[in-house]
Amino acid sequence: MISDPWFYLLSIPALLLTNISKGGFGLGLGVIAVPLMALRLSVPEVVTLLLPILCLTDLVTLWEYRGQWSWPLLRIMIPAALVGIGFGALAIHRLPETWLRLGIGIISIDFVRRRWWGSRRPAPGDRGLRPAAGLFWGAMSGFTSFMANAGEPALTVYVAA
């Protein structure tokens, strides 16, 4: 049991924002859950705590959007994301805590940068699937999703570019 009150003061708002974001109202603010919680716990502990919650909310999200996905896109992105998740699983157990915290900070800052930059971009044109780019950005999405619950920016780079 975690008895640190600061953990709860940081984690409860972070998890609320994550769940609001999963519902489509939080403008992607759920990405702050890992960095906030990592202020009081190690990154592997945070990822372990968040995984069941995120899996449950992802199942609800999948149900809400059932039948609205693009199968050709998923055939490229899912295997690539699984590879990225695998790399994330290897990295989280082999990299020092300092490097993990730095990586999560960079991913989080990049997420915010892309949100601000992306809101001013013109609407993307239809450029097709681009399998090589899809494999790269899918793997990046899986990796950043595993490490910092921030897979959306990499996915957006591919889909909206």
Image (spheres, rainbow, N blue to C red):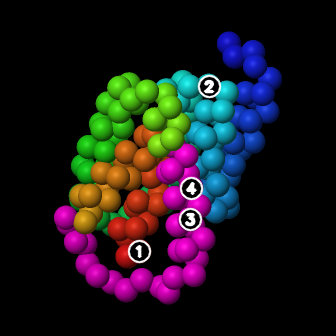
Q: Is residue 18 toward the left or the right of residue 10 in the image?
A: left
**Circle 3 — which element?**
helix
State which tag comes first along the sequence, 4 or 2. 2
Residue at x 43% of width, y 66% of height: 156
Task: Check disc 3 and report the residue beneath it.
Answer: 113
Residue reaching furthest to the top: 1
Residues tagged 4 and 3 counted as in contact (Cβ below 8 A) = yes
Q: Nearer the viewer, mark 2 or mark 1?
A: 2
Residue 109's disc number: 4
Residue 160's disc number: 1
Q: Nearer the viewer, mark 3 or mark 1?
A: 3
Q: Say if residue 52 shows up in the picture.
A: no
Residues tagged 2 and 1 counted as in contact (Cβ below 8 A) = no
User: Dot 2: few (<14), some (14–19), or many (≥20) neighbours within 10 Å?
Assistant: some
State the CA–CA distance, disc 2 to disc 3. Answer: 26 Å
Task: Check disc 2 and report the residue beneath it.
Answer: 41
For the residue pair 116 and 11, the one nearer the viewer reads as 116
State which tag comes first along the sequence, 2 or 1. 2
